[in-house]
Amino acid sequence: QVQLVESGGGLAQAGGSLRLSCAASGIFFSINVMGWYRQAPGKQRELVADIISDGSTNYADSVKGRFTLSRDNAKNTVYLQMNSLKPEDTAVYYCNTIVRDYRGSRSSFWGQGTQVSVSS
């Protein structure tokens, strides 16, 4: 089992910044993918950004140039730096990871979610 502990989030004004952190703990062999999704009221959950094992990153078009995802492999932690925030970034942000266990099986885990609210 893998636990994801999220921190950060909160309230920001448009144009401001926030930083989210997500730390993975538990028993696993390796992390294949780790990143953030978000879900706004009445909308489907969508990918914000993720980083795969080789270090390459993917970003939603709506956040490119504003958000930066980084990781600390030693801490099994990813950080989402969110700059130039817009009201449309308001959502619950969920950390997600896909890990491989010692038998070679892959599993996906979700954090509990953290609210990000951006006022205009």
Image (cartoon, grey):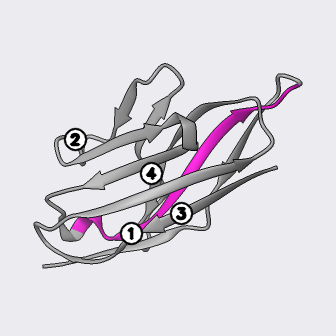
The residue to which callout 4 is attached is: 46
Q: What is the CA distance from the residue labelled 2 to the residue labelled 3? A: 22 Å
- The answer to whether the residues at label 4 and label 3 have Cβ atoms under 8 Å apart is no
Q: Nearer the viewer, mark 2 or mark 3?
A: 3
The stretch drawn in magenta includes residue 101? yes
- Residues under labels 4 and 3: Cα distance? 17 Å
Q: Which mark is residue 6?
A: 3
Identity of the residue drawn at 18% across and 63% down: 85
Specify the amino acid type for callout 2. Lys
Q: Assign a secondary structure to mark 3.
A: strand
Q: Report the mark closest to the observer, 4 or 3.
A: 3
Q: CA distance from mark 1 to mark 2?
A: 17 Å
Q: Check if residue 75 falls in the magenta segment.
A: no
Q: Choose the circle earlier in sequence order: 4 or 3.
A: 3
Of 80 and 106, which appears nearest the observer? 80
Q: Circle 2 sits on which residue?
A: 64
Q: Are marks 4 and 2 in contact (CB under 8 Å)?
A: no
Q: How many marks?
A: 4
Q: CA distance from mark 4 to mark 1?
A: 10 Å
Q: Which residues are magenta?
A: 88-102
Which badge, 4 or 2, is on the more N-terminal residue? 4
Q: Residues within 10 Å of mark 1 (few under 14, many from 20)?
A: many
Q: Which numbered disc flags the more N-terminal residue, 1 or 3?
A: 3
Return the x and y of residue 59 as percentages of the image width and height: 33, 38
Q: Percent x, y for residue 115?
A: 43, 74
Amino acid type of the residue tagged 4 in the rendering? Glu
Q: What residue appears at the point 20 percent right and 71 percent down from the top-left corner?
A: 87
Circle 2 sits in a helix, a strand or a loop, which is it?
Answer: loop
